[in-house]
Image (spheres, grey):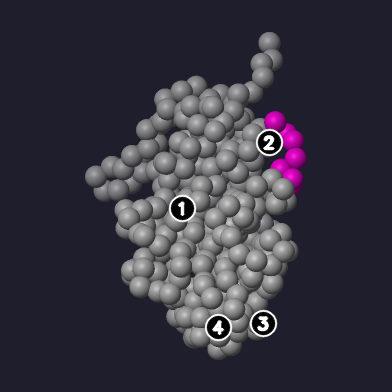
Amino acid sequence: MKRNRETRIIAGNSNLPLAKSISKHLKIPLTKAEIKRFADMEVFVEIHENIRGEDVFLIQSTSYPANDNIMELLVTLDALKRASANRVTVVIPYFGYARQDRKVGPRTPISAKLLANIITAAGADRVLTLDLHAGQIQGFFDIPVDNLFAAPVMVNNIRKNVSSDKLTVISPDVGGVFRARRIAKALHADLAIVDKRREKAGVSEVLNIIGDVDGRDCIIVDDIVDSAGTLCNAAAALLEKGATSVAAYVTHAVLSGQAVERVENSELSFLAVTDSICPSEQVKKSKKIKLVTIAPLIAEAIKRISDETSVSSLFSFEAA
């Protein structure tokens, strides 16, 4: 007798609070599993419930420590496939290695493509992710990929928390103009661009501001904040050009090294980030960093994928 497939959620260790929040929104308990390390740090996984023939969603961000979390994802994925799950969708709120999406010089790798190959080879049937650093990474996979946008969530949060009739949305570089323009249009705000030069990874220099920001309340929008150097330099440059205030909304809070301290000492009014990466204690204690959850967005996407209904409507700002 054929039975209906059930939706199951498995959580890796990279971002348990987000996984629990998604589980709560869906009213589906996390499937019991043991994901641990041996003494030599090898990953061991055991699924404690029967998932044969089920529709499984494995939630795991590949954030710091990136390589450990990637290996945990792969071993868990293998365990799920060997346990005869019908379909496994890998939910990667933050897709690590996404900044290595092309050859930047001779004899260098395209690590994002390598990671896509490995995830596919491990048995993933589908990938659900959020704000890929480069959209072409979807094409690195030979399986379906749903790339959600945090923009609707950000627009909704800005509407609730930022009251200004002189708002300008700022793209921190030319590559982020598409994202900034969509948000500016939704907010009926002006658009400006930071012209910067990056001599090496993690180090940037602001050269010019393209657009009028004098007397404007500025909001910088970006997909990743790592060292926070670009954000802090941009905030200072905008204020020098006459901006009244500068805040920032960023999807993925990598915040490596002294980034949190840099934000605290910067001229930013605040930095709003999503919980795609599990916030550290330093981030939680920060007076300038605010958390915006993307759990409802991912939960709704999981529901629609499981129900075989459209996910594309989640990309619109009306869905926020």
Q: Is mark 1 on a helix, strand or loop?
A: strand
Residue 291's tag is 1
Q: For this rendering, which residue is in front, 258 or 110?
A: 258
Residue positioned 49% across, 57% down in the render: 273
Q: How crowded is mark 2: few (under 14 residues within 10 Å), some or many (20 or more)?
A: some
User: Is residue 210 depicted above or below 264 in this figure?
Assistant: below
Which callout, 2 or 3, points at the residue further toward the start of the chain? 3
Which residue is identified by label 4?
A: 242
Which residue is identified by label 2?
A: 304
Q: How far apart are marks 4 and 2 (CA)?
A: 46 Å
From which residue to which does the magenta span run?
A: 307-313
Which callout, 4 or 1, points at the residue further toward the start of the chain? 4
Find the residue positioned furthest to the left.
39
Q: Marks 3 and 4: which is nearer the front?
A: 4
Q: Which amino acid does label 4 sit on?
A: Gly
Which residue is identified by label 3?
A: 211
User: Is residue 32 depicted above or below 89 in this figure?
Assistant: above
Q: Which amino acid does label 1 sit on?
A: Leu
Q: How crowded is mark 3: few (under 14 residues within 10 Å), some or many (20 or more)?
A: few
Quick check: marks 3 and 1 in contact, CB under 8 Å? no
Q: Marks 2 and 1: which is nearer the front?
A: 1
Residue 59 percent across, percent down from the top left: 50, 42
User: Based on the displayed image, in which of its 4 quarters is residue 197 positioned?
Assistant: bottom right
Q: What residue type is labelled 2?
A: Arg
Q: Residues within 10 Å of mark 4 (few under 14, many from 20)?
A: some
Can you see residue 291?
yes
